[in-house]
């Protein structure tokens, strides 16, 4: 595991009403959910980045109202074309 550090304004913690450790955990999850939603990373990689199990990450997707499935319109059209 690699450690990355960066600076945040003190107000980042107080405005969200989070203590530092919880804020960092939520920030990791939010980033992983966004990257997954954008199709940049797989569900397994996103769960790893978020520090969650795959099942926990799926729950996080639900909380953020992000679809568990990554299907583009083209993927869907291809699937439908192969249905007989």
Image (spheres, rainbow, N blue to C red):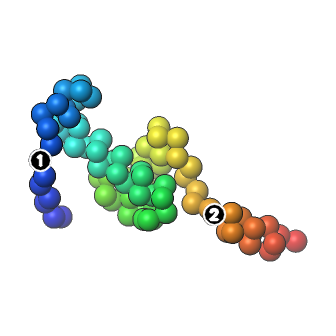
Give the residue pinned by disc 2: 72
Q: Would you identify the image quadrant in which residue 45 lies?
A: bottom left
Mark 1–mark 2 Cα distance, whole angstroms, equals 36 Å
Q: Position of residue 36 (x, y in %)?
A: 45, 58
Q: Is residue 37 above or below residue 84?
A: above
Q: Residue at x 24, y 27 (%)?
A: 15
Give the residue pinned by disc 1: 7
Q: Residue at x 68, y 63 (%)?
A: 73
Taking 81 as reference, is 7 left or right?
left
Q: Residue at x 17, y 39 (%)?
A: 21
| For marks 1 and 2 on the same chain, the one whose residue lies earlier in the sequence | 1
Q: Position of residue 53 (x, y in %)?
A: 37, 53
Number of residue marks: 2
Q: Is residue 33 visible?
A: yes
Taking 61 as reference, is 53 left or right?
left
Quadrant of the rendering where the N terminus is positioned: bottom left
Q: Is residue 52 visible?
A: no
Q: Would you identify the image quadrant in which residue 5 lies?
A: bottom left
Q: Is residue 5 above or below residue 81?
A: above
Which numbered marker is on residue 76? none
Taking 43 as reference, is 18 left or right?
left
Q: Residue at x 67, y 68 (%)?
A: 75
Task: Rate crowding at label 2 as few (under 14), some (14 to 19) or many (20 or more) other CA atoms within 10 Å.
Answer: few
Quadrant of the rendering where the C terminus is positioned: bottom right
């Amino acid at each position: 595991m690699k450690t990355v550090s960066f600076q945040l304004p003190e107000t980042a913690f107080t405005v969200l009403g989070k203590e530092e450790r919880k804020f960092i955990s939520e920030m990791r999850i939010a980033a992983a959910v966004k990257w997954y939603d954008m199709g940049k990373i797989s569900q397994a990689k996103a769960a790893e980045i978020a520090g969650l199990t795959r099942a926990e990450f799926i729950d996080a997707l639900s909380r953020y109202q992000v679809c568990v499935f990554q299907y583009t319109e083209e993927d869907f059209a291809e699937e439908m074309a192969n249905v007989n």
